[in-house]
Amino acid sequence: MDVAAAGDSRENSAVRDKRQHLKIADCSTGFKTGPCVTYLSLPAELIMDALDEHLDPPVDLGDESDSSDNSSRKSYKSKLPLARPLCVETKTESGFQKTYRICLELIREAMLHHRWQEAAQYMASFTEILEDRNKVRAQPNKELVWRISIEILHHLSKSTVKDYNTIYERMKHSGVKHYLMICLEHSFHLMLHGQIECAKQQLSIAESWRHGKESVSQLQRIKLIQAYRSLLDYMIWCDKKSMLSQNNSVESDIQGMHTCFRHASVNLQEILKNPGVWDPFILSYVEMLEFYEDYEEALKVLNDYVYDSNFPPNPNANVYMYQFLKRHSAPEKKLMKVLRNLHVLVPSHELMLEYSFLLLQSEKTSDTQKALGVLLEMLDFACWRSNMGVWTCLHTAVHRLLLQEEGEVIVHKQMALRKDWWPALHFTSFHAKKDLEENAKLLEVKASLEKILCPGRPLRYTAERMPT
């Protein structure tokens, strides 16, 4: 039966022959087999990569009959490695397998050309692959249907939440291997559409799901699901807090808010015992603890997150600690300790300017030397090259050290490894012209430092007005 589907009117005969193997049913919002059951996400580029692995290598389409310019036309062979095709024509190929292979080629072609409605129509036939009882092909086929279907629905203008729910539910019950990940993705989709309670229900169901002996990967996914369910409890808690601030407090509302906090905190306490990067979960937990004025517990959570050697080095953890300490007027000594750790991880971080301020406020020679090192490391990065605050602090640190005995030696020692490339980074005629146009004050500050930082170097950076 011929295909009555939207497509390119100039399709070649090979494609038309492939279509004869398929029965296509049109559906305005998705794709169906029999009754109108809509089907389900990775970026389109990854979908294409997965499809490429199923298809034959490209065929040389050069016209051999035209020999007029054979000398100038040579077949081009890409040096890039080709993915090993997983679905190629074989002598023992059954009719079902041939239809499956051809349908996959047509879906790939439609997706590459962004013909999403056509791809949805072909998907109606391709979903029959779920009936394949071959144990080797079953799981890869199910994942392929799941991810391609979702990608197609993302690009169909008339697709609805109900369409997504239908395909997610079908794929959950098509096999157990991807059940937890499909539940997690389903909840993300519901969250994006503002259906927080439904998303939480999906995660609650997944959290209680068990199949066979619990594997390591299954345990990790369950922990991830527990973490996101706690994050949804936090989001509901935020909604209730916002309503309390707008209306008069009612005891039942306060109690409901506290229930959400209790549910979230129980899971988050367990999750944070597992080493990893848990930034959004840490922030939500600390915010709730601060709201209930449990500052000691909040500080303990952040301390563990920053200093526990089991956790990977995380610049954000230090930032969260610093922000918490600053909100609660912690001593400068504690603030500098956190910023010192952050400096080791990210010397170009924006908080390093604040770190240099704190070091310069102490007026100790050792702290001034540290400030000089911090500021020079910031200026090693081009993003700080025109920052007035950094150069002003550097000017202060350098001139303060020059008043000390052996201060000039300290400065030259810091610049020893930079003398060959710093002039090109900061002190050229181009930089002088640019600084004069954008910030004349910056040019003056830098010009006062060039001979100190780069002595004996013939620099062309000058505070005089450059010719136009």
Image (cartoon, rainbow, N blue to C red):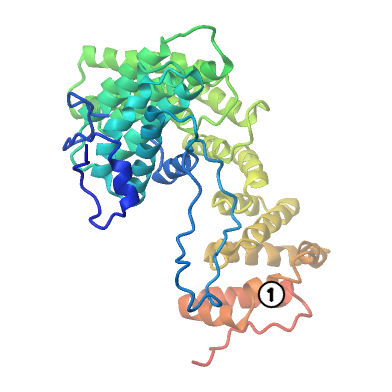
Front-lying residue, 296 or 125: 125
Furthest residue toward top: 212
* Image height of 414 relative to 1, above or below: below
Residue to which mark 1 is pinned: 423
Side of 21 relative to 329 (left or right)? left
**Residue 430 appears in view:** yes
Front-lying residue, 342 or 331: 342
Side of 267 relative to 153 (left or right)? right
Q: Residue at x 30, y 34 (%)?
A: 123
At mark 1, the secondary structure is helix
Front-lying residue, 319 or 324: 319
Amino acid type indicated by mark 1? Pro
The quadrant holding residue 253 is: top left
The quadrant holding residue 249 is: top left
Residue 393 locus on image (x, y percent): 60, 62
Residue 126 locus on image (x, y percent): 33, 31
* Image height of 164 relative to 113, above or below: above
Mark 1 surroundings: few (<14), some (14-19) or many (≥20) residues within 10 A: some
Q: Residue at x 45, y 60 (%)?
A: 61
The quadrant holding residue 399 is: bottom right
Residue 281 locus on image (x, y percent): 46, 28
* Image height of 157 relative to 215, above or below: below
